[in-house]
Amino acid sequence: MRLKGQVALVTGASRGVGKRIALQLAEEGATLVLAARTVNSGEGAYPGSIEETAAEVVKRGGTALPVRCDLTVSEDTENLCRTALERFGKVDILVNNAFYNNAQHYNMFLDTDLDTWNKCWIGNVLSPIIACKRLLPGMIERRRGIIINLTSPVGWSDTAAPGLPGKGGVAATYGTTKAALHRFTHNLAKETKLNNIAAIILDPGFAVTERMRAQTSSQGGIAMTGGHTADVPGVAVRYLCTCPDPLVFNGKMIYSPDFVLEHFLMRELRPPD
C-alpha cells in the first residue's frame, strides 16, 4: 500500500486505460477521484461507468469519488479540480488520460467539421492544461507530486498503422492535439523538476479497449491483432507512481509495453481474446 494517504485524479476512468490505471493505483492504497462523462451503467455508448469503477475501487478496500466531467467544457474541468480539492484537500497524482472522440475519429480532413476540431483542442489539450494549472500549486507547496499525460504514437511519430483515415488510420484531429499535449508536457517538466515534481508522457501502446473494439469494426479503424490489454499502461503508471524516484522519468516519454517488460512488471503482454 505504497500510495496510502495519497489522492489520485484520473480522467476517462469509466472504462479502458483510465479504468485500469485507477484500479492499479487503488491496489496501492490511493484515494481515487474518477472523472468521465458516463456516470451510471448503460448511459454511454460503450460498456463502463465511473460508478462501476468506483465500486471496484471499494471492493479493493479503497475510497473513490466519481465526478461527472465533460472535458470539452472547460468549466467542467474547473469544477472537477475544485471538487477534488474541496473533498480531499489535495491531489498528489494527476493522470490526464481522457481524450475527445466522436464519429469523425477516422475521418479524412475535409470530412471533419470545425466543431470536432474545437472539441478536440479543448478536451485533449486545454483540459489537461487547466487541470495542471489548478492542481500544480498544491503540489509545489508540498514539494511532491506526479503528472502523467497520455500521448499516442500518432502524436510523436509517423504511425505504423497503414492506410488513410477510415482505412486504418485516425483523423488529423487526434494526432495534432496529442502532439500539442506531448510538447506541453516536455516544457512543463523543465519547471516541475525545480519543485521535485515529475511530469511524464506515457504512450499506452496498442491497448485494446471497449471503445476501440466497437469503433474500429464500425468505422474502418486498425485491426485488433497485435494489441495488448489495458492493464499494460495501468501497470506502468503504478510503477511510475510508486518507484523510489519518479524524477528519473521527468520529461521522458514512456512507451508502456517496452517499459513493463524492461522492468519485469508483467510476465507477458497477452493480447485480449
Image (tube, grey):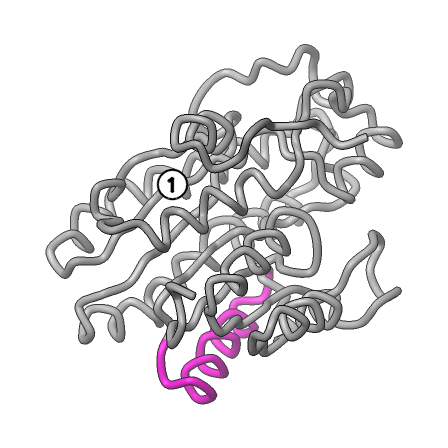
Q: Amino acid at mark 1?
A: Ile
Residue lying farthest to the bottom in this orientation: 86
Q: Quadrant of the N terminus?
A: bottom left
> How far from the left and from the top, in percent, is residue 215?
81, 36
Q: Quadrant of the C terminus?
A: top right
Residue 25 vs 152, above or below: the answer is below
Is 71 situated left or right of 209 in this image? left
Residue visible at 74% across and 46% down? Answer: 102
Predominant SS of the magenta segment: helix
Residue lying farthest to the left in this orientation: 194
**SS at circle 1:** strand
> How far from the left and from the top, in percent, is residue 116?
66, 46
In the depicted view, which residue is nearer to us: 58 or 65?
58
> How far from the left and from the top, in percent, is residue 236?
46, 42
Q: Which residue is mark 1?
A: 201
Residue visible at 45% across and 25% down? Answer: 258
Q: Which residues are magenta?
A: 72-90
Residue visible at 47% across and 69% down? Answer: 29
Is 263 situated left or right of 63 in this image? left
**Mark 1, residues whose alpha carbon is within 10 Å: few (<14), some, or many (≥20)?**
many
